[in-house]
Image (spheres, grey):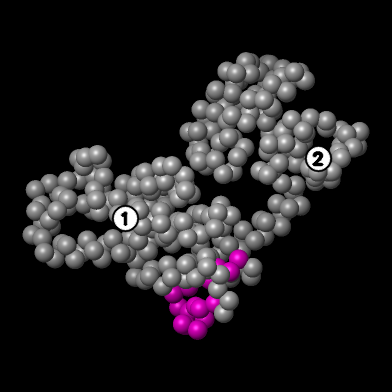
Amino acid sequence: MPATNGTYPKWSEDEIEKFAVHLPVYECIWNKRSPGYRQQDDHVEAWRALGIVMGRTPDDCKNKYQNLRSALVRDLRYHPFGEESPDKKSGWIKRDLFRFMQDHVQPRSRLKEESTATRHSLTMYRGTSEQPRDSGLPEVDSHLTDEEETPSHSSPSSASLEHLKNLLEPVPEIAGSHLTSNSKGVKRPHEDGALDVVIHALAGYTRNRLPHPGCSSGSSAPFEQLEPGRSPKLVKFASNIVARLSEFPEPEQDKLMKQIKTLIIKTELKLYETAEDGEEKTSTCE
């Protein structure tokens, strides 16, 4: 428990070593490629469990992790792994205990370089005319001419995104924003449960669009009444999204997941609604 002044008891050297032994188990805390890294519930549960193991509060463990992570980043800035670390100069001799995190933390100078690229990438998501120079991704602007829309040197990923972009218009803007706001984030396609994650992200929208009970046009039950909880049409919809996500290399997914997900969902939504409208023309349901 924290002291009355809001501080926590000092960690002993043995406790830090014990912390380094148990921390790798809770990958969602430090591993950016972990399925639960962007899931708040997973973080809460991980800190709770780690607190029990350490005999400290979750907040105490979290604060210690932040301090240790900062120390590792600071030390790596001057002494990358692979080089002998002059401990007397760095003042931190525990870094080898946290070697498992070396690929998931970066010195501030490297983060600053990446933040510039990320900031440019975000302009694509916002639909502005500014675009990153080195990403190979075209800007999302429906007013560009055909010549302007086609990059002269397209990578496989930029070609895929270009194909997606060409299918976007016209798309109801409210649908894309609704799906984005209700999604917890799409996991990478190679991870188990990716299809379930996509279906969960779409459920809030599709449950209001499926035909009403009693309709004679195929899958008529609302989303909540389907067994085992999903319609064939929705499964196909989600499968298409997962397949399109797999076209992008993993580093690009990590940096641009939100933008890519939005474009893909909008694209598949258009195809989904087009197919749905075709069925509704043959149905007597409202």
Image position of 286 with respect to 72: above or below: below
Image position of 15 with respect to 273: above or below: above
Magenta part of the chain: 135-151
Does dot 2 land on a helix, a strand or a loop? helix
Image position of 21 with respect to 34: above or below: above
- Does any portion of residue 279 appear in the rendered image? yes
For the point 47% across and 67% down, which residue is it? Answer: 160
- The residue carrying mark 1 is 237
Q: Main secondary structure of the magenta part?
A: loop
Q: Residue 208 location in percent, x, y?
A: 24, 50
Q: Residue 53 location in percent, x, y?
A: 60, 18
Q: Is residue 146 toward the left or the right of residue 130 in the image?
A: left
Q: Quadrant of residue 54?
A: top right
Q: Is residue 205 toward the left or the right of residue 24 in the image?
A: left
N-terminal of the pair, mark 2 or mark 1, is 2
Q: Amino acid at mark 1?
A: Phe
- The residue carrying mark 2 is 75
Q: Is residue 194 toward the left or the right of residue 99 in the image?
A: left
- Does any portion of residue 5 appear in the rendered image? no
Q: Amino acid at mark 2?
A: Asp
Quadrant that contains the N terminus? top right
Q: Is residue 202 toward the left or the right of residue 149 in the image?
A: left
Rendered image: mark on residue 151: none
Q: Quadrant of residue 240?
A: bottom left
For the point 59% across and 21% down, which residue is it? Answer: 51
